[in-house]
Image (spheres, helix red, strand yellow):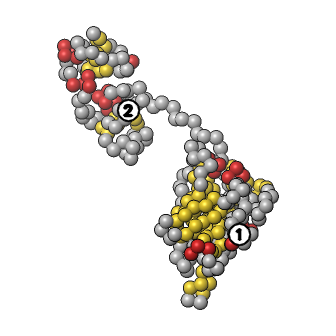
Amino acid sequence: MQRFFVACFFVCSCTAYNCTWTNTGRGVSYNLTALQSASDYVFFDVVTQAKYFLDPCQAAVYPLCGENAACCQLWDGGSDSGFASLGNVATATASALQNHQYKDGLTISFEKGDPVVVNGTAYARSMQIDFVCDWDGGLGSPVLGSAGPPDAPHYVFEWITHYACSGPPAPPPPPSQCTPLSDCKRCVSASGVQCSWCLDSNLCVTAAELNVTSCPDYVRFGGQCPLSGCAVYPNCTSCVPTVGCSWCIDDGSCIATPSNVTTCHNAVKN
């Protein structure tokens, strides 16, 4: 696990912890300062009927759990036994993002929360916040991902935000050789590159670009395309008189005009 080291402290009215972290292994830094709020982020767990109060960079503003609580858990309407600190801000440490392989971000962990007593044995609560990079995520907000059993009371929160991104957004990938092929037949029969035709979006993509989740219906390289549009016309005589269609001499197919003419060097148009 790559460790993070403190880059700076900053002061707030509550007990603060570090909001700028540097991953020395990767040589990148994260600054969560913009997520800090004058009031807590509050969310309600419909399963356990508990409320959670937390604020990045400082202890929870909600007073019941004390001035050092990284997150204050509230249940039973806040009775004397209905609240607990899930971790002490003085124990804040950061590491490479956990539970999200290949994604940018960081995990901040807290120990020494209020104990849970099970059969006379006390187990200290602990928590972590997985800050996950998403350049379209804006500020984002925390959600409860999981909570451990009473004898292992560890809470995992997830926070998707662009402030968990260590660098500028990645540039879009350059167009592939498949991209200009705008009909199914030319796509799956292209020479020099194996392309697939997505029936849902009518796009020609490489095997690496094919996402079967967003494109469940597709024709692989060498497959048989369903006939539709201009492709239903089997010869030049029936193709050319049809509005919007041209006959491609290169491969003997009826193609849409004008979008596909750029990929066909010899076309007969009406």
How many numbered circles does the render carry? Answer: 2
What residue is rendered at 35% in x and 32% in y?
A: 202
> Looking at the rendering, in which quadrant would you find the C terminus?
top left
Task: State the image coordinates of residue 31 (x, y, percent, origin top left).
Answer: 71, 51
Q: In the drawing, does residue 202 fall left or right of residue 84?
A: left
**Amino acid bearing label 2:** Leu
Which image quarter: residue 107? Answer: bottom right
Residue identified by numbered label 1: 63
- Residue depth check, mark 2 versus mark 1: number of the one nearer the observer: 1
Circle 1 — which element?
helix
Identified at 37% across, 35% down, the residue is 201
Residue at 52% from the left image edge and 69% from the top image edge:
49
- Residue 124 in view: no
Q: Residue at x 54, y 35 (%)?
A: 172
Q: Which residue is mark 2?
A: 203
Mark 2 or mark 1: whose residue is earlier in sequence: 1
Is residue 138 shown above or below 145? Answer: above
Indicate the amino acid at tag 1.
Pro
Q: Is residue 130 above or below residue 27?
A: below
Q: Position of residue 151 (x, y in %)?
A: 55, 80
Q: Tell me the SS state at disc 2.
A: strand
264 relative position to 101: left or right: left
The numbered disc on residue 153 is none
Q: Using the rendered image of the protein, determine whether residue 231 is visible from the camera's viewpoint.
A: yes
In the rendered image, residue 40, in percent from the top left (x then y), is placed at 66, 60
- Up the image or down, 148 lies above or below 98; here it is below
Q: Quadrant of residue 141?
A: bottom right
